[in-house]
Image (cartoon, rainbow, N blue to C red):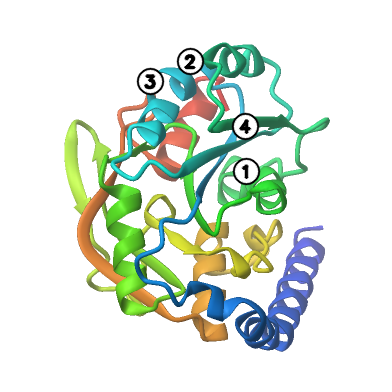
Amino acid sequence: MGNKKSVRNWVISKSQKLRYRLTEPAALQLARSRYGRLYDDQTENPLVSIIIATYNRSRILVERTIPAVLAQTYANVEAVIIGDCCIDDTGKRIASLQEPRVRFVDLPQRGRYPADPASRWFVQGSVPRNKGLRLARGKWFGWISDDDLLLPNHVESLLRFAQRGEYEFVSAAYIAERRGEKIVIDVKDITPRIGGMQTWLYRSYLRFFQWNTQSWRKSWDRPCDYDLQFRMARAGVRMGFLNEIVAYVPSVEGTNTVGLEAQLLCQTQGQG
């Protein structure tokens, strides 16, 4: 049975890889020809959509994450929040904000993810994120998890950097908290140099780059954000890296860490 699963995963991941490599570079050229000229004005103040996938984290979302989006030094932003079929009070809490810059849509059923906790962590949230791609109205897209914090300069710094450099995709450094230590993640040793998802900002005509819900099947770069950023790079998206810290990723409540390590701890504690 294990060998059959391995073969299935290999076939699906290889077919996905081939499809992306055959279609995405051509789609990029077409999107540039249609919409590239709309980004020529480097002084423009376009709408920026911050897209957030969430599942049952209403208190953190409303008390911490959304306020950080709305407190940006750059005012023309919207928060597009997609629930992965939440069963808590997320909808009521967001509605109580009475904030026109915040939109919430809850999926009628939860995305299908692998049962294995590690494999699930690689792709969880990819289904609502793809929904967010379709709903976002901004000229630029940014992404955060529902417990991330954007620093006040996040949107303004990234947007002006992208405009000046005529980049289609920009990212930057961020701080992650593990075991009480705040660590600067600046990806100096990664080529191409791309910051974490919570530091991305890119042109909305790149929305055809969908989040790969099957990336967990790969043997490397299994997280769906890694999969997406490297697909963009291979397709030829013009990328830039800003040497500034623009986001903060606190430790997940009850775990004192972040990422896969936090996911596995939550699973052990019955929270996953």
Q: Disc 4 marks which amino acid?
A: Arg
Q: Disc 3 marks which amino acid?
A: Gly
Q: Quadrant of the N terminus?
A: bottom right
Q: Which residue is mark 2?
A: 59
Marks 1 and 2 sit apart, C-alpha to C-alpha, by 18 Å
User: Image check: 176 left or right of 41?
Assistant: left
Q: Which residue is mark 3?
A: 254
Task: Give how far across and how far down residue 164 sits, in percent.
Answer: 30, 74
Q: Work out whether mark 3 precedes mark 2 in sequence or the reverse, and give the earlier one.
A: 2
Q: Disc 1 marks which amino acid?
A: Gly
Q: Assign a secondary structure to mark 3.
A: loop
Closer to the camera in the image, 214 or 53: 53
Q: Assign a secondary structure to mark 4.
A: strand
Q: Residues within 10 Å of mark 4 (few under 14, many from 20)?
A: some
Q: Work out whether mark 2 precedes mark 4 in sequence or the reverse, and give the earlier one.
A: 2
Q: Residues within 10 Å of mark 3 (few under 14, many from 20)?
A: few
Q: Work out whether mark 1 precedes mark 2 in sequence or the reverse, and give the earlier one.
A: 2
Q: Is residue 164 visible?
A: yes
Between circles 4 and 1, the one closer to the viewer is 4
Marks 4 and 1 sit apart, C-alpha to C-alpha, by 17 Å
Q: Tell me the number on the disc at residue 103.
A: 4
Marks 3 and 2 sit apart, C-alpha to C-alpha, by 15 Å
Q: Work out whether mark 4 precedes mark 3 in sequence or the reverse, and give the earlier one.
A: 4
Q: Residues within 10 Å of mark 1 (few under 14, many from 20)?
A: many
Closer to the camera in the image, 27 or 268: 27
Q: Work out whether mark 4 precedes mark 1 in sequence or the reverse, and give the earlier one.
A: 4
Q: Quadrant of the C terminus?
A: top right
Q: Residues within 10 Å of mark 2 (few under 14, many from 20)?
A: some
Q: Tell me the number on the disc at residue 83.
A: none
